[in-house]
Amino acid sequence: MDSIEQKSGERATHFKETRTNRHFEIAEDYTELIADLIENQRYVRICDLAREMGISHVSVLRTIKRLVRDGYIVKNGSSIELTQKGREMAIFSKKKHLILTEFLLLLGVPEPIVATDVEGIEHYISSTTLEAIAVHVQLNFQKNK
């Protein structure tokens, strides 16, 4: 295999990883939001998700059906609950969100921009990069104590 073919293969791998991340992006957003709402109000309904996300009830209903099918949530009457799989995803998504928020704030990025940037970055960052950032944030936190 020549160098051009090898680079094309490597490039294809990166595109495939990005497409896989896109698949999980919505599930991560929903599970994280559902976990937050459960913590704050003990129950979650379709209208709560639609309001928080600024989207239609129909869009939420379509996504909820997929998340039920994929094993992330269950519906009990009008209430939505996370499965163990959904809770694990929500915890990991929240961890990414918090680490990236701290990192961008540490860099001096203004809070309103951080809030928007983190929503995009958190879905596409590798575990390796996230852990490196977490170590950097922790070291900086310890240095400033």
Image (cartoon, rainbow, N blue to C red):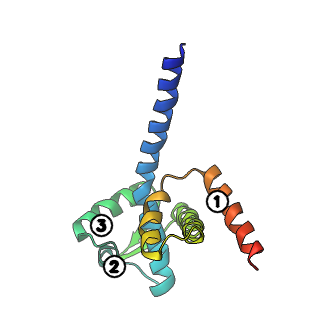
* In this view, the mark in front (1 or 2): 1
Check disc 2 and give the amino acid type. Answer: Asp
Label 3 Cα neighbours within 10 Å, binned few <14 / some 14-19 / many ≥20: many
Against 49, is 25 above or below? above
Which corner quadrant holds the N terminus?
Answer: top right
Label 1 Cα neighbours within 10 Å, binned few <14 / some 14-19 / many ≥20: some
Asked which secondary structure carries label 2, the reply is helix
Numbered tag placed on residue 48 in the rendering: 2
Q: In the current view of this chain or complex, which residue is farthest to the front?
A: 108
* Residue 5 placement (x, y as % from top left): 49, 18
* Residue 18 placement (x, y as % from top left): 45, 44
Q: Which residue is at a point 30% across and 66% down the rendered structure image?
A: 60
Q: Report the Cα–Cα distance between label 1 and label 2.
A: 33 Å
Q: Is residue 73 visible?
A: no
Asked which secondary structure carries label 1, the reply is helix
Q: Name the residue under label 3.
A: 60
Which is nearer the N-term, disc 1 or disc 2? Answer: 2
Q: In the current view of this chain or complex, which residue is farthest to the bottom?
A: 41
Q: Are circles 1 and 3 on residues that touch, CB within 8 Å? A: no
Q: Name the residue under label 1.
A: 133
User: How many numbered tags mark residues here?
Assistant: 3
Q: Report the Cα–Cα distance between label 1 and label 3.
A: 33 Å
Q: Are circles 3 and 2 on residues that touch, CB within 8 Å? A: no
Check disc 1 and give the amino acid type. Answer: Ile
